Amino acid sequence: MRYVLLAALVGLLAACSGGSDDQASSPATQKGAQLPEWVKETLTARAGPDVAATMGSEDFAVGDNRVVFLVVRENGALVQSPAATVEYASEGEQPRTAKALLQPLGAHEHAHGDDAEPHDHLDVTDVYVAHVDTPKPGRYWFVAGPAGEKIQAVGSLEVQEHSVSPALGAKAPASDNPTLGTGPAKEITTAHPPDTELLRYSIADSIRAHAPFVVVFATPEFCVSRVCGPTVEVVEKVAGKFARSGIRFIHVEIYKDNDPKKGFNRWVQEWNLPTEPWVFLVDAAGVIRGKFEGAVSVDELETAVREDLRTAP
């Protein structure tokens, strides 16, 4: 019976790879893909249901990758144990282990320490984040087991030689995005109320001024994925912590004329972003020092700003 369920899970992973807003695995999981033997054995040995991981990131390259995902029960509730063990491997290799931590999004805060009780939410207030090392291109499978829970999630990562989005260490594209100096806030941002403090500078002006900056590509009004999170709110909160640091914080919308029907705007295209939201950290030399695909927590971003831009308020 368990193998029948595993076969159904493979079908679910394949079906969910067709471009849905909420992806229950990476888009690279192709129809007809077969679960590796180690995945089958791992799932068979564990109690509880097997579900497809709902992915919040998909641009993976050789090296360290930040993997964002949800574990969703069959009734739609989110599993929110504070940590999960992630076993992962490319095809034909033995699995390695990483740890995923539950990262709170936006203003939602409660205890997520090792002693916190597992609990569920129907709305997305947190995401699991794991860092995995992928030394070569190819498909990697993973099994995530939330601590204290009888459930496990299966997903896959399609790892390319190079990321689609701008790489760490690359020069940031000098996009001349709109600012309050070029138009009213209501025409620039979909945030309500307008995030005016994030609309003061353009990327191009910041590079010319040799000013370090954090730029978020996101659309608050048209965020449709269950895992996109309140990213602009997170950036605003972190910006307040660095108000006197000289670091600029910038928001760029996603769609042309803020209309999803018109597709990605030219600034998103200049940065070659395959998804949204994205956050990039750029130093005074215009070099990308950090980046986050998908939802990001205040703690993650604040720590990265301190470490990657080498400053403190």
Image (cartoon, rainbow, N blue to C red):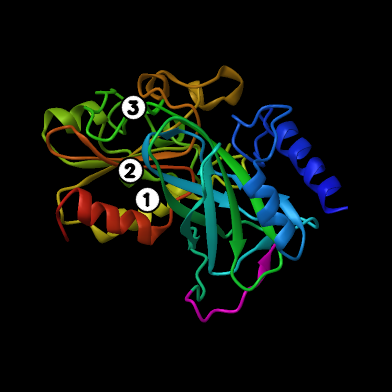
Numbered marks: total: 3
Q: Which of marks 2 and 3 is nearer the N terminus?
A: 3
Give the residue drawn at x 25%, y 30%: 203
Give the residue drawn at x 71%, y 63%: 46
For residue 178, the mark is 3
Q: Give the range drawn in magenta.
A: 113-121
- Which percent across, then down, holds residue 51? 72, 51
- Which percent across, then down, holds residue 286? 17, 32
The residues tagged by marks 3 and 1 sit, at their Cα atoms, a distance apart of 18 Å
Give the residue drawn at x 61%, y 41%: 225
**Pick the front one: 7 or 311:** 7
115 inside magenta stretch: yes
Mark 1 — residue?
A: 235
Amino acid marked by disc 2: Leu
**Pick the front one: 239 or 150:** 150
For residue 198, the mark is 2
